[in-house]
Amino acid sequence: GSRGMFSKLSGGVFSSKEEVKKEHADTLLAFCARTRRLAPLLSLAHTVASVSDLADLYFREFHLELSKAAEFPISTSLPWILASHAVRLDRWDSKARARLIDHCLIPLEVYEDAAARSLGPFQRRHLFLEVEAEALVHLDQIVESIALRLFAGYRHDAA
């Protein structure tokens, strides 16, 4: 098994005797087992960037292939679903709704990561323009929803 790489090496400058004693080999193998998950920490910036990249939540060509559709309606877009949920909470108290409305623009990070990937690794300007267009529509609709909610709230308070 893997112990063989530490125990005997034949040919070359090494003789056929044990180069690493069994107790040292066991210690070395235990150390390797404990530290194998440390590799991502050595490139922490790359690891954090890869696990926080939300672009995969935007790219949905697989769904377009399955549904044989030409486009993806914004109402089924994950950023839109999350943001509209934050805006349309009638059943929650006003404090909980206010906290969620504060965060309703966070799903726009999906568009930011998708745009960065479309210009970076993909190098596709047309894809970037598609992401930008959807993000602008999304932002317009969220701002309109928030404005309507605020207007309705103030109208109710004034009555």
Image (cartoon, rainbow, N blue to C red):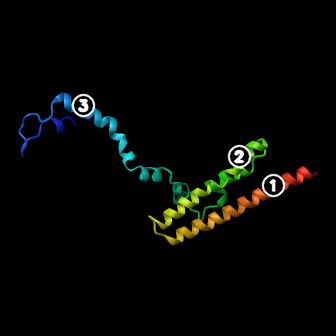
Report helix, strand or loop for mark 1: helix
Residue nearest the viewer, comparing 55 with 39: 39
Residue in view at x 46 percent, y 50 percent: 48
Q: Work out which quarter of the rendered image holds the N terminus and state it.
A: top left
Disc 2 vs disc 1: Cβ atoms closer than 8 Å?
Answer: no
Q: With respect to residue 157, does 31 lie above or below? A: above
Q: Amino acid at mark 3?
A: Thr
Disc 2 vs disc 3: Cβ atoms closer than 8 Å?
Answer: no
Q: Which residue is mark 2?
A: 99
Q: Which residue is mark 1?
A: 150
Picture coordinates of residue 34 (x, y %)? Answer: 33, 35
Picture coordinates of residue 28 (x, y %)? Answer: 24, 34
Determine the CA span between mark 3 and mark 1.
Answer: 65 Å
Q: Earlier in the sequence, mark 3 or mark 1?
A: 3
Determine the CA span between mark 2 and mark 1.
Answer: 14 Å
In this rendering, would 150 be left or right of 82? right
Q: With respect to residue 88, does 25 lie above or below? A: above
Would you call the spot at circle 3 few (<14 residues within 10 Å), some (14-19), or many (20 or more)? few
**Numbered label attached to residue 88:** none
Picture coordinates of residue 13 (x, y %)? Answer: 6, 45
Residue in view at x 78 percent, y 44 percent: 94
